[in-house]
Image (cartoon, rainbow, N blue to C red):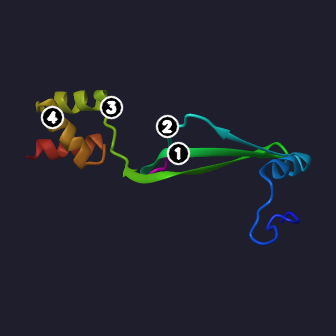
């Protein structure tokens, strides 16, 4: 992409010269310091990148993030609101743990959880 980048005999371009060329082209690159982890949240899971090195490249007002690190994917757990648990407990007379488990089994559907506990 840049003339002379490959060098001759395996030598690469001087990093200071490379930085100067990028600056002349309107490209600004900086590294975020002290990043502990990066979390990408999707509908089904969280992608967690630990020991992350994050570089930001800014070109013509747009920023591009490059992230390198140790990646693991963790499935999201269904979050059950306390009000839903309370309602199921009131409607069925079961304990908090039973109400929570019924809501988890019904994927958070109140009516399905109540019906399942009432018919048990």
Residue 97: which numbered mark, if any? 4
Q: Nearer the viewer, residue 55 or 41?
A: 55
Question: Looking at the image, which residue sits at the far front?
Answer: 9
Q: Are marks 3 and 2 in contact (CB under 8 Å)?
A: no
Name the mark nearer the viewer: 3 or 2: 2
Q: Secondary structure at mark 4?
A: helix
Q: Secondary structure at mark 1?
A: strand
Q: Are marks 1 and 2 in contact (CB under 8 Å)?
A: yes
Q: Which residue is mark 3?
A: 81
Q: Is residue 43 magenta?
A: yes
Q: Which residue is mark 1?
A: 52
Q: Are marks 2 and 4 in contact (CB under 8 Å)?
A: no
Residue 21: which numbered mark, if any? none
Spatial CA span between label 3 and label 2: 30 Å
Give the residue displayed 29% in from the left and 28% down from the top: 82
Give the residue displayed 78% in from the left and 72% down from the top: 9
Residue 36: which numbered mark, if any? 2
Q: Is residue 98 left or right of residue 86?
A: left
Instruction: Answer with mark 3 or mark 2, whichever residue precedes in sequence.
Output: 2
Quadrant for the N terminus, please.
Answer: bottom right
Q: x, y percentage for residue 49?
A: 48, 48
Spatial CA span between label 1 and label 4: 38 Å
Q: Which residues are magenta?
A: 39-44
Pointer 3: residues within 10 angstroms few (<14), some, or many (20+)? few
């Amino acid at each position: 992409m840049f003339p002379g980048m490959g060098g001759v005999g395996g030598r690469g371009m001087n990093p200071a010269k490379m930085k100067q060329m990028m600056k002349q082209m309107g490209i600004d690159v900086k590294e975020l310091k002290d990043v502990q982890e990066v979390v990408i949240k999707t509908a089904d899971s969280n992608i967690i990148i630990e020991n992350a090195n994050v570089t930001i490249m800014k070109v013509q007002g747009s920023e591009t993030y490059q992230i390198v690190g140790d990646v693991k994917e963790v499935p999201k757990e269904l979050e059950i609101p306390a009000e839903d648990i309370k309602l199921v407990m009131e409607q069925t007379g079961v304990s908090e743990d039973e109400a929570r488990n019924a809501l988890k089994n019904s994927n958070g559907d109140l009516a399905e959880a109540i019906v399942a506990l009432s018919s048990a």
